[in-house]
Image (spheres, rainbow, N blue to C red):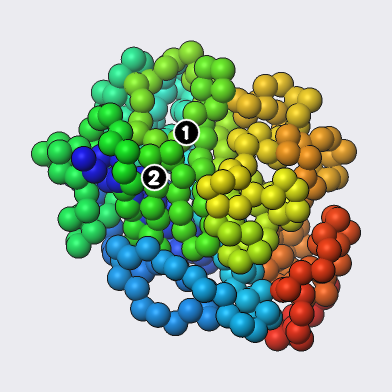
Amino acid sequence: MHSTATHMALAAALLASLLAACDGKKEDFSNSAKNTGTTGKSGTAVIPPSSKSEMKPWERPSYAPPADPEIHRIDMVEFERQAYNTLRKFGVAQRAFINDINPMPVDLDGDGAGEYGFLLEIMGVSYLRTPGGLGRAPVHMSWPLFKAADAKEKAIIDKSSRDDMGFVKPKAQGGEEYLVSSAGAVFWVDEAGIAERAGYYFMFFLPGREKAVNAGALVPPGDPSTADALERRFAGIAWPKKHGVTGRRVFFSGKPEEVWSRWNLGPVCSGRETVPDVAAALDSAGPNPGNLDAEIASVESGKKPGDGGRWRFYGEKKDKKEFEWEWPKDREIEEYKADGGGDEPWMKGEDKRKKKSS
């Protein structure tokens, strides 16, 4: 009954761990060689500074914007920072999955080059893909970015979808969601493979035979015909749960530690009604963007992205002196309007963070 709920909860926590656990820490992903089940610390949902309510690990966070438009803007900046971190660290986890575990978790074509993983594989709670099946026992990294739920959260996990070692078994999705948490953050992932965390929705993708497949879904049998593509590409995309309330940007990642962003001006993505396309940030004239083969179409590249937006690299710049979430308000407003935006409520009031413009 709770197979999807279980698995998506697991994926949710995985992503959460990836965020909180990685900030300011050196990543060490060597294989611990322990395949004895999954453990992870329960955590609270990450919510912005203006929300002071204490939440239990299994409670879904809610957000009511404050009346002060500047405090609301600061909250949205924090939601955006967390969305960036989620995508960035998903990429870091993918890189670790193919490079830092011995023996290699998934190598469907046997060429010695590993393939990127589904969310549940990275978490160590699903059997690994083999040609035509799921035949290898799960693996665990010594310091995993994503972990399965533990303690009280385990009560949410559907026992019928797990074997006697505690690993997720392949099973038809039951139309519900599953919960995953670790390192102080929680994710919910539903039957559509849409994850939810801290004001944003997320979807993760891997290349398929002809079009990208949902990497947040239950792990399918391995398909050797997709191995070469799986060695090169993955994607994650994030958009606000409610545009202008929980965020103002859309994010995309297709390589470890690379995240791109555009202002959510058009097409506007908000909630489950307007979900971004998997190829939103990819070159629309490139090879098969719907299967992640095309390159990023940034503003600087002069190429046209799938959604027509103005995508820019987001995060730490080469001079390592600034992040977008540290920008002063006037700089945000300048870029927002340069990209076609108009006056918005969050632009009102004095900049209370008083960040210096570089």
Of the residues tagged 2 and 1, which is closer to the observer?
A: 2
What's the amino acid at mark 2? Asp
Point out which mark residue 5 bears: none
x and y percent of residue 167 in the render? 22, 39
* Residue 289 placement, left or right of 350: left
Q: Can residue 295 be seen from the camera position used here?
A: yes
Residue found at x 63% / y 27%: 290
Q: Nearer the viewer, residue 298 or 28?
A: 298
Quarter of the image where the N terminus is located: top left
> Image height check: is 28 above or below 332?
above
Q: Which residue is mark 2?
A: 190
Residue 301: name its quadrant.
Answer: top right
Q: Which residue is mark 1?
A: 214
Label 2 SS: loop
Quarter of the image where the C terminus is located: bottom right
Residue found at x 79% / y 25%: 285
